[in-house]
Amino acid sequence: MRVTSIDWKSWQPQETATLLFVIKDDQILLIRKKRGLGAGKINGPGGRIEPGETPMECAIRETTEELCITPINVKPAGELFFHAEDMPRIHGYVFTASDFTGTPTETDEAIPLWHNKEKIPYHEMWEDDRYWLPAVVSGKVVTAWFTFVKETVRDYKVEIQEV
């Protein structure tokens, strides 16, 4: 299915979620997800937005729950739209943080992993990450649309805004 074949103006997600990437100096803090959608994959911490919660509040809460840290200097870095017939349709908000308080700690949900931001392990992540995450890591803001079948990207469009 092509991205251009979807009426994105009337498209409705089944889930709305967040991702947050702590990018400090030349390092990025990622997680290995231990359960739920994407278990076993590497990603940023995040999760579903709860009723009454803003996307940024969710990103901070989820990062705290998954890694026992509180991100600092959190800022929006993009929006992602994922359409699939065999997985939930997701509208995702992406955030970055330049620092945190606390110590990244393994929880029931995630194992913290520091990586050099030039050596992100895309081969262990969702396939779409390689198309938009490099722009976010370099300080840009993205809007991206993806179609998936069986966890494989079928088509995508990424718009990058200079900040």
Image (tube, helix red, strand yellow):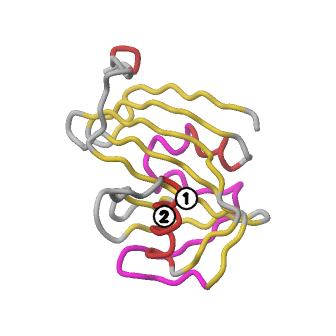
> Label 2, on which residue?
45
Q: Mark 1 points at which residue?
A: 20
Of 139 and 27, nearer the camera is 139
Q: Which residue lies furthest to the left in this view?
A: 86
Residue at 60% over, 27% down = 159
Single out the residue that lies furthest toward the front: 52
| Numbered disc 2: secondary structure | loop
For the point 66% across and 80% down, which residue is it?
101
Q: Does the magenta stretch include residue 107?
A: yes
Direction top: furthest residue: 5
- Find residue 3 and report its horizontal and vertical position in percent: 40, 21
Query: In this rendering, is residue 121 above or below 61?
Result: above
Secondary structure, mark 1, is strand
Residue 82 position within the rendered picture, expressed as x and y whole percent measured from the top left: 37, 37
Q: Position of residue 51 (x, y in %)?
A: 33, 57
Q: Which of marks 1 and 2 is nearer the N terminus?
A: 1
Residue drawn 65% across the image and 60% down it = 74
Question: What are the residue bounds of the magenta stretch?
Answer: 103-131
**What amino acid is at disc 2?**
Pro
Quarter of the image containing the N terminus? top left
The reply to whether the C-beta atoms of the residues labelled 1 and 2 are less than 8 Å apart is yes
Along the line of sight, the residue nearer the viewer: 137 or 59:
59
Q: Name the residue type under label 1.
A: Leu
Hey, which quadrant is residue 115 in on the image? bottom right
Quadrant assignment for the C terminus = top right
Q: In this view, does 111 lie above or below 54?
A: below
Disc 1/disc 2 C-alpha distance (Å): 6 Å
Q: How crowded is mark 2: few (under 14 residues within 10 Å), some or many (20 or more)?
A: many
Please say whether residue 111 is one of the residues in the magenta stretch.
yes
